[in-house]
Amino acid sequence: MKKKTYAIGCAVLAIDMKHCAKKLGIDIEYKFLEAGLHNNPKLLKEKLQAAIDEICATDLCDRIIIGYGICGKGTIGIQSGSVPLVIPKVHDCVALFLGGDQAYKREFKKYPGTYYLSAGWCEEKTEPISQRKQWVYFGDKKLNFNDLVEKHGQDAAEHTFDFLNSWQKNYQRAAFIETGAKTSPKYEKLALEMASEYKWKYDKINGSGELIGKMLTAFDSTSDILFVPPEHVIGFDAIQSTLSANPILDLKTNLKKTSSKKIIPGIKIHPDSYIKTGLGIDAGGTYTDAVIYDLKEDKTLCKSKSLTTKWDFTKGIGSALKKLDQEKLLRVELVSLSTTLATNAIVENEGQKVGMILMPPYGLGIDKNILFYPKSVIQGQLKITGREVIPIDPDEVRQKAVQMIENHGVTAFAVSGFAGSINPEHEIQVKDIIHEHTGLFVTCGHELSDTLNFQTRAITAMLNARIIPRLASLLLDLEKVLDALGIHAPIVVVKGDGTLMSSTMAKQRPVETILSGPAASVAGARHLTGIKNALVVDMGGTTTDTAALTDNLV
């Protein structure tokens, strides 16, 4: 039986995806999930993964098109199974309606505070203004105005609605995107009603199906599209702020599912292409453990333990590796490192001296809630929409940086600005100025987190900058030892969520390895015991970490 192409997407994209597929003459089986799941990324991930697994189980599919973007990171962690996935490298559906990220950025620059609508969005999400006045969402709960009046009185109901509708102040424009997929005066009318009701400017924008077309026809990754091969997981590259594909290193499962299956017409995956022998190293605060593992047979070949030598990691790592079977060691094709180094450095308040540069919102004084020194507030302000209110003063940035170096001996900087995750331009400017003037390392909040909480991003950037030398030293020492032993396998590092990152990326973002050791312990406990519900306790020399495993999830 001939295999089909499937598409799973948000219901707001249904009109445009079907229209584009028809124009291209592509036969696609569709499954659309209810609109609004981006507001609950965890639920989005659960429903999307379930839909993918269901389609893969039929063995009737050659490719699955994913009609989502990053969507609040709801697609991060999605696994491809036995069938490759195709997903656009965009943050949300607006870029798909406009034809790509560049078009989105142009519109954002003109009007950061824009509420976008399309024919598909209107059909799935919008209710007439006359109805919209009568209800409002509080979290996932829909509140009815008349119910509030009955229970709490007219004044309380009005105040509640005013507060819950305060989001409208973040927008200045309603824009209807005319994609040409389905035209009707009623769609544009809804957008006009919204603009009139909320006193926003109104614009009609010509959209494009170009990016959707690329998505539907892609068999390789491009600058716009991510092609996720079988047995890979979708990741997030915070530095580039885009999606990535990482291998799932479970050979036994991979071989069962894909060794004899045709994945893409003309392309077959041979079992010999998979990694057969891996080296696992766990660098703890007290001991360094090493294991050579046969991924094909799913068994440990040999293992060893040595004391961790923090003053020179090469000694502890080298000692552990020398105790292993040297013939088997030379067959290693991948090296995976888990470590409590970052966690221990933070717990013990160690690391290099960091200067924090902040650009908080005007008048709120929330920078005072960040109990870290040295820190400095500089000129440069954005609205919550990302629109610039006050520009950066380069001379002030240089002056503050030099003062921190001279007065506090800082050797790295952390930069965080209000609305930096929406518009990182100010953070990038400050980073470039400091690096050019001092030559020191700078971490920006937007590089590590897309959360709107500027304080959280500031602390995350500070921790990352503080522990960079320590993890970089560990990885460089590991590379030296492996090179001396003639092992040239790629090195990956276990992140705090149990996924893997390259050693190059780990040197830039060591903060993501916090809880790396405990994450590896949970994965190991689950694998060794087969128990899906358990309390896992990792008792180390510095910290004791616990994790609850429920239905295979932490």
Image: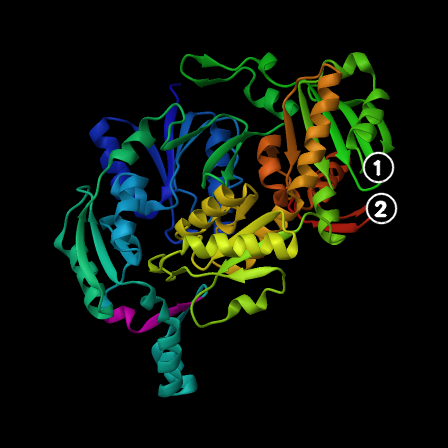
Q: Is residue 497 magenta?
A: no
Front residue of 111 and 208? 111
- Residue type at tag 2: Gly
Q: Quadrant of residue 67?
A: top left
Q: Quadrant of residue 281?
A: top right
Q: Residue 248 in the image: state x and y as whole percent.
A: 59, 29
Q: Residue 550 in the image: state x and y as whole percent.
A: 67, 49
Horizontal arrangement in the rendering, residue 208 relative to residue 395 (left or right): left
- The quarter of the rendered structure image containing the N terminus is top left
Q: Earlier in the sequence, mark 1 or mark 2?
A: 1
Front residue of 379 and 367? 379
- Residue type at tag 1: Tyr
At label 2, counting other C-alpha atoms closer than 10 Å, the crowd grade (few under 14, some 14-19, many 20 or more) is few
Kindly give the residue lying farthest to the left in the view shown. Answer: 185
Q: Which residue is mark 2?
A: 541
Label 1: state its secondary structure: strand
Q: Residue 147 in the image: state x and y as whole percent.
A: 38, 79
Residue at 38 percent across and 19 percent down: it is 2
Q: Which mark is residue 287?
A: 1
Q: Which residues are magenta?
A: 130-138
Front residue of 182 and 277? 277
Q: CA distance from mark 1 to mark 2?
A: 8 Å
Q: Residue 42 in the image: state x and y as whole percent.
A: 52, 50
